[in-house]
């Protein structure tokens, strides 16, 4: 026998043994799976909707916040729970009912005889709807929802009772004398066409569609009111209950016609997506805003700041008795509502501890949720809510709590319900209409912010000067206009088509200061509302869609704007650039300043190695056995998911790098006074967010519980991991309250000004 024949026989024997192994070992394992698929396949739309909805509720940070409706001050727990259970019950009934109809068409009316799997599958779907709801409530409890365990138990018990009713409904009806009125199986045989649906099923389908159209109209009319009345979790279950009958009916038609109708709809939606886009960045309504072409440069803004804060003196340079003027540059990071609220806590506490500080806040650079907090703060300043003072950190004329109460009150509302309502109704329907005209979920989110602003304002004085729906340039104001000062706002988005920063600001965004960044106003040639400017920075992945940029006048498309965190999540790059340019401008004018650079971060998982300065300076950067091991490097499906995780983590890494760069620049200024001679004893402080001792973390999204908000307010007064927020606040207040004497001399040959504190 030849060598080749031996090899051939050997390989054949191996294949035979593999075949025997598959038949004897894997066969018994696959048979249950094939049986399970034979059950799921006919009712796949109910199963898919349950799986997708369950994944949304329990496997995503946004889904885990849906239940925060039960923590709303304006809604009783009983009302919220009643609406929630009604919506879950609606979805559960739809999943059960249409799964049964699907089985009829697949295997006939007698499909359940002797087959417990097919008999119990629809009941399982109904129970699973309540199960996912109970699970989401339990998880919400870990995020700070009070009485979550009780609410989850109520939901689970209600679900069990619902399933029991489905089991005993026919015998119960017969016992009560209703006969077979609750029995939906008409007899033997198998329906084959849509027309074979029973009159009850046709009526139920028609009613479900009409109900969906009513909900669509209501959400288009008032997305904020409808979304907040139902709550995010309830509106999600209600929408699932509308999707199931429509999808199931389309599958029935597909079976009848042999055409893949659902797939055809999805392909159609993809083909028309260029025309169905309803996410255009809207032009600001109202008037009174300055012309965007007349905005100041950074140099002009420095002159305006000096005019408000006392000028440069008669000699144009500090004299022997002068002090370095404190100038604050704030960078605030992204992180949904927790970032917005944390920004409000920090700025509100700063206003409370040092009234008049807003005159010394030169700029605020925000990303995502940080931009929302900055926008609410700026709107409050525009409405005159900061108390009048005769001197920095001095006695106030009025209440120092007004502005803090307003910004915290605005950001205490529930913003996820309106967003979810718009997502599942007008936004979903719009995907199948080749003309983008329905309102979108991004606009609903911005409207919810504005509604919350007015709730917090109430009928109080000073609330009518301009809200979050007013033009950005009107509310942010021209720096120094009218003899007052409002901080320069720099709200950072990301330009989708280039990956560069797209900055909305009340000053010109020029390349000599902001390297490789676009000016949003110059790009679209029009103003937007304050809320829209914040939204463009806070287009949180999938929760808020990419905004379509359209140039005024000719309607030319200029690309899309994404969440600013795609570029870097801290706002630190932009803050460093304006701080550098401002320091140079002050130096050019012979004014010594004390730069105070503030970083507000909102990542409770930020490891010690990513903390700039302080205790983290002594931490070994590559602490492989601790930090990196705890981060559980990806392993499952890493070939597919690895690049995605890498891109997502890079945005945070760039922010950390920029944050550390600012801290390093401040250290450099201290050690090398000739680098920026007019910058005297600069200060860098970091206000960080961290997990609590019980393991809870502030949720990432657009809903927070009362408990989380209260804990964040308390976080400003103590340590947070390796960072001491109380010490950071004390450092800023001390720098503001304690004038820093300065003396400056001119180097005759070069003409440079050299300043130092004795």
Image: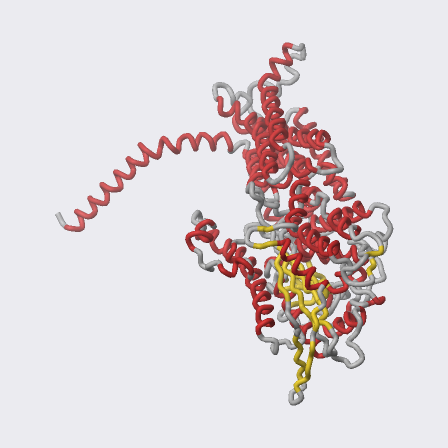
Q: Quadrant of residue 507?
A: bottom right
Q: Is residue 200 left or right of residue 631?
A: right
Q: Which residue sits at x=66%, y=46%?
A: 714
Q: Is residue 624 left or right of residue 203?
A: left
The foreground one among 42 and 68 is 68
Q: Is residue 264 visible?
A: no
The number of numbered badges drawn on the structure is 0
Q: Which residue sits at x=29%, y=37%?
A: 19
* Up/down of 132 relative to 507, above or below: above
Q: Residue 21's x, y, as percent?
A: 29, 36
Q: Is residue 479 visible?
A: yes
Q: Residue 601's x, y, as percent?
A: 61, 55
The foreground one among 247 and 487 is 487
Q: Quadrant of residue 479?
A: bottom right
* Up/down of 129 relative to 677, above or below: above
Q: Residue 13's x, y, as percent?
A: 22, 41
| Colour scheme of the rendered structure | secondary structure
The outermost residue toward the bottom is: 749
Q: Quadrant of residue 165?
A: top right
Image quadrant in which the C terminus is located: bottom right
The outermost residue toward the left is: 1
* Up/down of 108 relative to 613, above or below: above
Q: Which residue sits at x=77%, y=62%?
A: 392
Q: Residue 669's x, y, as percent?
A: 60, 72
């Amino acid at each position: 026998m030849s060598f080749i024949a031996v090899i051939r026989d050997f390989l054949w024997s191996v294949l035979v043994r593999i075949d025997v192994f598959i038949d004897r070992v894997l066969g018994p394992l696959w048979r249950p799976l094939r049986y399970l698929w034979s059950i799921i396949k006919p009712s796949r739309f109910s199963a898919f909707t349950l799986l997708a909805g369950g994944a949304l509720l329990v496997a995503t940070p946004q889904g885990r916040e849906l239940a925060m409706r039960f923590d709303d001050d304006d809604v009783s727990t009983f009302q919220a729970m009643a609406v929630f259970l009604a919506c879950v019950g609606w979805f559960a009934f739809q999943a059960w009912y249409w799964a049964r109809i699907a089985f009829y068409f697949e295997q006939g009316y007698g499909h359940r005889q002797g087959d417990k799997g097919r008999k119990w599958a629809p009941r399982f779907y109904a129970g699973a709807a309540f199960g996912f709801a109970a699970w989401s409530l339990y998880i919400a409890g870990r995020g700070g929802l009070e009485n979550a365990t009780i609410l989850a138990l109520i939901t689970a018990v209600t679900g069990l009772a619902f399933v029991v009713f489905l089991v005993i409904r026919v015998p119960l009806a017969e016992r009560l004398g209703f006969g077979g009125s609750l029995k939906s199986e008409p007899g033997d045989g198998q329906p084959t066409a849509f027309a074979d649906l029973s009159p009850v099923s046709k009526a139920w389908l028609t009613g479900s569609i009409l109900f969906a159209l009513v909900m669509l109209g209501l959400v288009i009319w008032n997305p904020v009111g409808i979304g907040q009345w139902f709550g995010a979790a309830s509106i999600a279950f209600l929408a699932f209950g509308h999707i199931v009958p429509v999808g199931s009916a389309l599958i029935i038609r597909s079976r009848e016609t042999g055409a893949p109708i659902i797939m055809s709809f999805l392909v159609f939606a993809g083909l028309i997506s260029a025309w169905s886009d309803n996410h255009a960045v809207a032009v600001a309504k109202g008037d009174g805003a300055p012309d965007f072409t007349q905005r100041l440069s950074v140099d002009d803004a420095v002159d305006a700041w000096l005019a408000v804060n006392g000028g440069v003196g008669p000699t144009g340079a500090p004299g022997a008795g002068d002090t370095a003027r404190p100038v604050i540059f704030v960078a605030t990071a992204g992180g949904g509502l927790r970032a917005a609220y944390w920004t409000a806590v920090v700025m509100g506490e700063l206003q409370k501890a040092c009234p008049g500080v807003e005159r010394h806040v030169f700029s605020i650079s925000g990303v995502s949720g940080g931009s929302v907090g900055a926008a609410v703060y700026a709107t409050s300043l525009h409405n005159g809510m900061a108390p009048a003072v005769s001197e920095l950190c001095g006695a106030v004329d009025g209440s120092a709590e007004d502005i803090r109460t307003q910004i915290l009150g605005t950001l205490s509302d529930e913003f996820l319900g309106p967003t979810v309502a718009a997502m599942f109704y007008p936004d979903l329907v719009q995907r199948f209409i080749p003309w983008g005209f329905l309102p979108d979920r991004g606009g609903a989110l911005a409207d919810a912010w504005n509604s919350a602003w007015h709730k917090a304002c109430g009928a109080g004085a000073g609330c009518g000067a301009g809200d979050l729906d007013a033009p950005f340039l009107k509310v942010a104001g021209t720096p120094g206009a009218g003899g007052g000062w409002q901080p320069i706002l720099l709200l950072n988005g990301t330009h989708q088509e280039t990956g560069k920063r797209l900055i909305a600001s009340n000053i010109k965004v020029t390349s000599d200061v902001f390297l490789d960044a676009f000016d949003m106003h110059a790009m679209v040639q029009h103003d937007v509302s304050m809320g829209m400017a914040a939204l463009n920075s806070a287009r949180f992945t999938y929760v808020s869609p990419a905004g379509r940029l359209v140039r005024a006048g000719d309607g030319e498309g200029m690309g899309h704007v994404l969440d600013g965190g795609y570029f870097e999540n801290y706002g630190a790059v932009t803050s460093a650039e304006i701080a550098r340019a401002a320091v140079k401008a002050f130096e050019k004018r012979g004014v010594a300043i004390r730069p105070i650079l503030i970083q507000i971060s909102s990542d409770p998982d930020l490891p010690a190695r990513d903390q700039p300065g302080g205790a983290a300076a002594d931490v070994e950067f590559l602490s492989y056995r601790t930090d990196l091991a705890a981060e559980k490097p990806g392993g499952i499906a890493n070939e597919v998911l690895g690049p995605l995780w890498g891109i997502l983590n890079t945005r945070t890494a760039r922010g950390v790098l920029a944050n550390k760069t600012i801290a390093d620049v401040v250290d450099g200024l201290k050690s090398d006074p000739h680098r920026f001679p007019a910058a005297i004893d600069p200060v860098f402080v970091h206000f960080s967010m961290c997990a609590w001792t019980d393991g809870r973390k502030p949720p990432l999204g657009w809903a927070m519980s009362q408990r989380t908000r209260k804990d964040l307010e308390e976080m400003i007064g103590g340590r947070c991991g390796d960072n001491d927020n109380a010490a950071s606040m004390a450092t800023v207040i001390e720098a503001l309250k304690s004038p820093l004497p300065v003396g400056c001399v001119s180097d005759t040959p070069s003409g440079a000004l050299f300043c130092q504190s004795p």
